[in-house]
């Protein structure tokens, strides 16, 4: 139930819309009832009653303007004017006592649970007092408003709980949509990097190697016989092979991720550890050789995993140091990122044995590791930091 524009608009479910329309209809119907009684059973106060009833409807309708242009303070002032008009009306006619019921819901919404409940109790007391003055003190005149207040309070609190749940669901849906977009972007980026790495490997292993072999054979032919006919053509062929080899190597460099251009994975990780975005003062120790004999797509994936993990450490771990370690031997590859931060319980993120979680960052890491055919392990606990470990088999790491 809500005043148009004053009550919450989001999310606009059919239930909320129906309750809001019902509240408007109730206010209008009860006000028309008061006016009809004043016309059909005229008294000395009929004119004042009709005027106050019209003023109450105008004030009620003015709530839409208050909601669109004013804040909480303006809404409270509007509710005060509406309540004052109702009090004046109820002292003229007991028929206006029924209008207190829709006011209950406005009190709860605009004033909150505690102040709204206090306003409900106060308005109930006013209604009981007015009925007692007009019609004498009766059981119905006392119990009726009290029962109405109880019903209104329960319905209003239930509506607020439903609205909060709907808002939480809406926020969750928006988060899921945003996460899906981020995941799609990450998967797209990962696919592009993987394809670039594949093309670089193919060019290196086929065209570049072939041109290098042709160049070496032509050079050997030149040296074998300096006086043979057509030697100048062999020389031109060797130069053409050298030029094409340089072009192929340029393509390989352009396809290689920029972070890995200079000194491979080790150099890229050291640049990561000393980059400006680590200016928060987190020391990161890198224990990786400058030149690691790994396929380009594996180096790219490990670099992206390290970037995501260090970003999580800075944002969430409250750590004082972190360490990146890479070990490659005959038994396979082991890549770890460890920190001494607050840690967490992987089970709270949907993990099983510390190997799977529903966290977006760890989910993206898990997908990268799955693409490599490796195993991701997350070892963490409250107060003992976090260690993220990637393990690849020997045949994958070579």
Image (tube, rainbow, N blue to C red):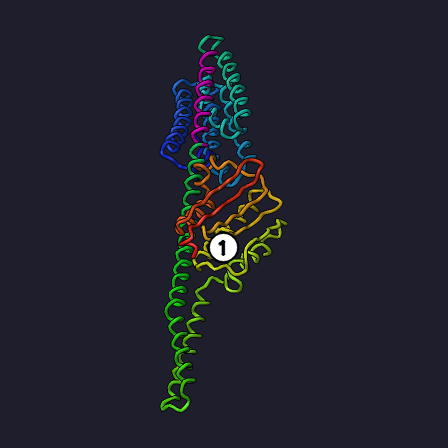
Q: Residue at x 39, y 32 (%)?
A: 16
Callout 1: SS: helix
- On the image, the x and y values in percent for residue 309 come to 51, 48
- Quarter holding the C terminus is bottom left
Q: Residue at x 55, y 45 (%)?
A: 338
- The correct choice, above or below, for 22 with respect to 237 in the image is above
- The correct choice, above or below, for 343 with respect to 327 in the image is above
Q: Residue at x 41, y 23 (%)?
A: 30
- Quarter holding the N terminus is top left
Which sits in the foreground, 334 or 155?
Answer: 334
Query: Which region shows up in magenta?
Result: 141-164
Q: Is residue 285 left or right of residue 304?
A: right
The answer to whether residue 279 is seen in the rendering is: yes
Which sits in the foreground, 110 or 380?
Answer: 380
Say few, some or many: other residues with alpha carbon within 10 Å of mark 1 (under 14 / 14 to 19 / 20 or more). some
Q: Is residue 221 left or right of residue 88?
A: left
Q: Is residue 156 magenta?
A: yes
Dominant secondary structure (helix, strand or loop) of the stretch shown in magenta: helix
Which sits in the foreground, 160 or 347?
Answer: 347
- On the image, the x and y values in percent for residue 186 come to 43, 52
Q: Which residue is mark 1?
A: 303
- The correct choice, above or below, for 13 with respect to 118 in the image is below
Q: Residue at x 42, y 21 (%)?
A: 38
Q: Residue furthest right?
A: 281
The answer to whether residue 9 is seen in the rendering is: no
- On the image, the x and y values in percent for residue 386 come to 54, 41
């Amino acid at each position: 139930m809500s005043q148009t524009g004053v009550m919450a608009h989001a999310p606009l479910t059919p239930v909320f819309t129906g309750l809001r329309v019902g509240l408007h209809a109730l206010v209008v119907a009860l006000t028309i009832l008061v006016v009809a009684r004043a016309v059909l059973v005229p008294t000395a106060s009929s004119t004042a009653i009709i005027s106050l009833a019209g003023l109450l409807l105008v004030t009620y309708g003015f709530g839409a303007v208050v909601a669109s242009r004013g804040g909480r303070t303006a809404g409270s002032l509007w509710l005060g004017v509406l309540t004052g008009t109702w009090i004046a009306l109820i002292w003229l006619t007991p028929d206006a006592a029924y209008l207190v019921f829709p006011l209950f819901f406005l009190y709860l919404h605009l004033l909150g649970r505690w102040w709204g409940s206090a306003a409900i109790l106060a308005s109930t007391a006013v209604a009981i007092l007015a009925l007692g003055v007009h019609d004498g003190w009766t059981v119905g005149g006392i119990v009726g408003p009290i029962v109405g207040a109880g019903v209104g309070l329960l319905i209003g609190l239930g509506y607020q709980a439903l609205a909060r749940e709907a808002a939480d669901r809406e926020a969750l849906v928006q988060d899921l949509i945003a996460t899906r977009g981020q995941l799609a972007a990450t998967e797209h980026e990962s696919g592009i990097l993987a394809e670039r790495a594949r093309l670089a490997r193919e060019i290196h292993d086929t065209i570049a190697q072939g041109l290098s072999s042709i160049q070496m054979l032509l050079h050997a032919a030149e040296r074998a016989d300096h006086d043979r006919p057509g030697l100048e053509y062999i020389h031109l062929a060797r130069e053409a092979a050298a030029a094409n080899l340089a072009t192929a190597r340029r393509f390989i460099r352009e396809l290689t991720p920029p972070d890995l251009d200079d000194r491979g994975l080790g150099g890229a990780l050291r640049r990561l550890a000393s980059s400006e975005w680590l200016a928060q003062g987190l020391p990161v120790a890198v224990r990786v050789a400058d030149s690691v004999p790994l396929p380009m797509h594996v180096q790219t994936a490990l670099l992206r995993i390290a970037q995501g993990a260090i970003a999580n450490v800075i944002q969430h771990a409250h750590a004082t140091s972190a360490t990146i370690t890479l070990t490659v031997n005959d038994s396979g590859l082991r890549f770890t990122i460890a920190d001494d931060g607050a840690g967490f319980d992987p089970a709270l993120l949907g993990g099983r044995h510390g190997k799977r979680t529903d966290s977006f960052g760890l989910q993206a890491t898990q997908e990268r590791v799955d693409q490599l055919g490796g195993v991701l392990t997350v070892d963490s606990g409250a107060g003992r930091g976090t260690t993220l470990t990637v393990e690849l088999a020997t045949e994958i790491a070579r």
